[in-house]
Amino acid sequence: MKEYKAIIVEGKSDKIQLKQILDEEVDIFCTHGTASDEQLEGLLDPALYHNVFILTDADFPGERLRSRLREYYPNAVHLFTRRMYREVATTPLEELARLMAKAHFQVAEDYLI
């Protein structure tokens, strides 16, 4: 049986960054930062995914969104980029690859050091 994974990120640039390094099929959902409660609740159906991951920016809006997402997806695994990079989109690909590999994602070998 295939294990479906989903990642929730803030924006399209975060999604693009992840797609560059991931070497497996993963559904990536964007909240576009300012999603309403209804949009967050209906973002994805957790019953369809074996694992849901949340990766938001390391800033106040990202942490606020993460807090809101915890309410709707309490079983999600939270991934964190380093504060020094602030945003997922500005995190170096090699650093992002290490983070995702540590979370048991298949990552393109080009980005693993």
Image (cartoon, helix red, strand yellow):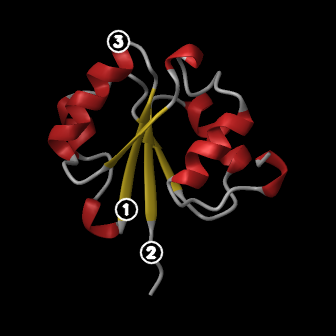
Task: Read off the residue under disc 2.
Answer: 3
Q: CA distance from mark 2 to mark 3?
A: 32 Å
Q: Quadrant of the N terminus?
A: bottom left
- The image position of residue 106, as x and y in percent, is 64, 62
> At numbered mark 3, what does the secondary structure look like: helix, strand or loop?
helix
Farthest residue, direction bottom = 1
Find residue 51 and name its label. 1
CB atoms of marks 2 and 3 within 8 Å: no
Location of residue 113 (image quadrant): top right
Task: Read off the residue under disc 3.
Answer: 60
Which numbered disc flags the more N-terminal residue, 2 or 1?
Answer: 2
Which numbered disc flags the more N-terminal residue, 1 or 3?
Answer: 1
Which numbered disc flags the more N-terminal residue, 2 or 3?
Answer: 2
Residue for point 25% across, 37% down: 69
Is 96 or 52 nearer to us in this picture?
96
Q: CA distance from mark 1 to mark 3?
A: 25 Å
CB atoms of marks 2 and 1 within 8 Å: yes
- The image position of residue 48, as x and y in percent, is 33, 68
Seen in the picture, residue 72 relative to 33 is either above or below; the reply is: below
